[in-house]
Amino acid sequence: MKITGVTPFTVDGGARVWTFVKVETDEGIVGWGDCTEWDAYPGVVGMLNHLTPMVIGKDPMNVERMWAELTAYNIRHNGGLAWKAMAGIDSACWDIRGKALGAPVWQLLGGRINEDLRLYWSHCGTFRFRWAERLKKRPVRRLADLARLSEEVLEAGFTAIKTNMMALEDIPNPGRMTSSKVGMDISTAQIKNAVAIVSTFRKSLGPDVGIALDTGLNFRLGSAIKLARSMEPYNLMWYETETFDPGSLKTVRDSTTTTICTGESLYGQEGYRPFLEKYAADIIMPDFAWNGVTMGKKICDLAMAYDTLIAPHNCHSPINTLVSASIASTCSNFYILEFDQDDPPWRDDLMTHPLIVKEGRLKVPERPGLGSDLIEKQLKKYAVNK
């Protein structure tokens, strides 16, 4: 079997642009991958087009060799958009392998441990604060709206959520939500903002629902410590903070009783290894739209060797949800999977077999490959830059 074509698709994902890649073969088997990078999608598409001549004519069944060759080719610009494109091609090749062999991807990875996966409602409140009209949802403007949203969370059967700081109308002087300056210290106003949002969710959801707070790369060492300590009364599922310095994160973890999660901005085993060796976080969250199936599974297994849970970063497309499910279902150190419940209403229209989510859990598909194809007519209908 040989690869005959690589085609990117950029699709309106409501809060972001979804970037898909279609890989075709001379035997008529087609695979789909995800390489979403939100606003940087033109760069990913450019890199996909750049890498296409390298994979045309290659056997998609030899995923290890292809990953090794692409990694070597991109060594001077390791990570970044190059790895996004690589991951999309890699996942599509695994989809092809499964279809060719008549087996789900999870079966090719050793077989599943779980038939369904616990989910957390990600960007809970955040998407409705920023993009309610586009998503056709009731907007979040005040703390009372978060309390009302909590009722939806419980009714849908979710046992955990993740949220962010928001400039809600009834939070006086909410402070900046994000920082363009690496190293920015956190202000008293920002800490009060986080406390107001998390405490509202905790009161509304009760003591047993997991709550995660995500601040990404916005706050450095001292700030992360202050914020983690301010969260201690609320028994968070985790505080999510990113840094490229494992020693810094280890200091944060040692300074607080709040659970620490990190890793969405890391790539490759060599990226995660120093964090794991220092036991810098309680949980890591590998991003498979950046690491693909081939490297993603290796990262999860490496984390297992360091007694560390995985909670895959999955704020991309429904194809990435299937990739994440394929890997996570085979991992005994799987904890919980990110899921954007507030995806646009046309998400399922893109898929031949939509995601099955019941009571806050995702059913792991049993069909060959990743579990669903995409419908090109629908991709073109919702295309960005048609």
Image (spheres, rainbow, N blue to C red):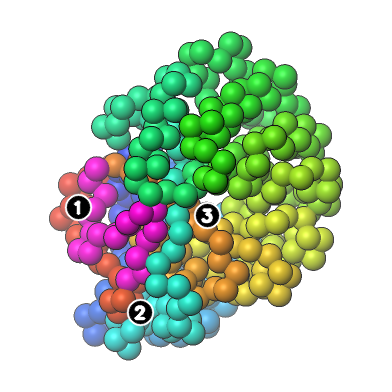
Q: Does 359 appear in magenta?
A: yes
Coordinates of residue 324 in the picture (x, y in percent): 45, 64
| SS at badge 3 | loop
Residue drawn at 66 percent across, 72 percent down: 304
| SS at badge 2 | loop
Residue 218, can we see it? yes
Residue drawn at 72 percent across, 31 percent down: 230
User: In the drawing, what numbered circle is on residue 104?
Assistant: 2
Circle 3/circle 2 CB separation < 8 Å: no
Coordinates of residue 111 in the picture (x, y in percent): 45, 83
Mark nearer the N terminus (2 vs 1)? 2
- Label 3: few (<14), some (14–19) or many (≥20) C-alpha neighbours in 10 Å: many
Query: In the rendered view of the protein, which quadrant contains the C terminus?
Result: top left
Coordinates of residue 342 in the picture (x, y in percent): 35, 41
* Picture layout, residue 367 above or below residue 47: below
What residue is disc 1 on?
349
* Picture layout, residue 241 above or below residue 176: below
- Label 2: few (<14), some (14–19) or many (≥20) C-alpha neighbours in 10 Å: many
Residue 36, can we see it? no
Coordinates of residue 351 in the picture (x, y in percent): 23, 59
The amino acid sitting under disc 2 is Pro
What residue is disc 3 on?
313
User: How far apart are the two marked residues, 3 and 1, measured between alpha carbons?
Assistant: 23 Å
| SS at badge 1 | helix
Magenta extent = 345-365
Q: Residue furthest left?
A: 377
Mark nearer the N terminus (3 vs 1)? 3
Q: Does 100 appear in magenta?
A: no
Residue 75 quadrant = bottom right
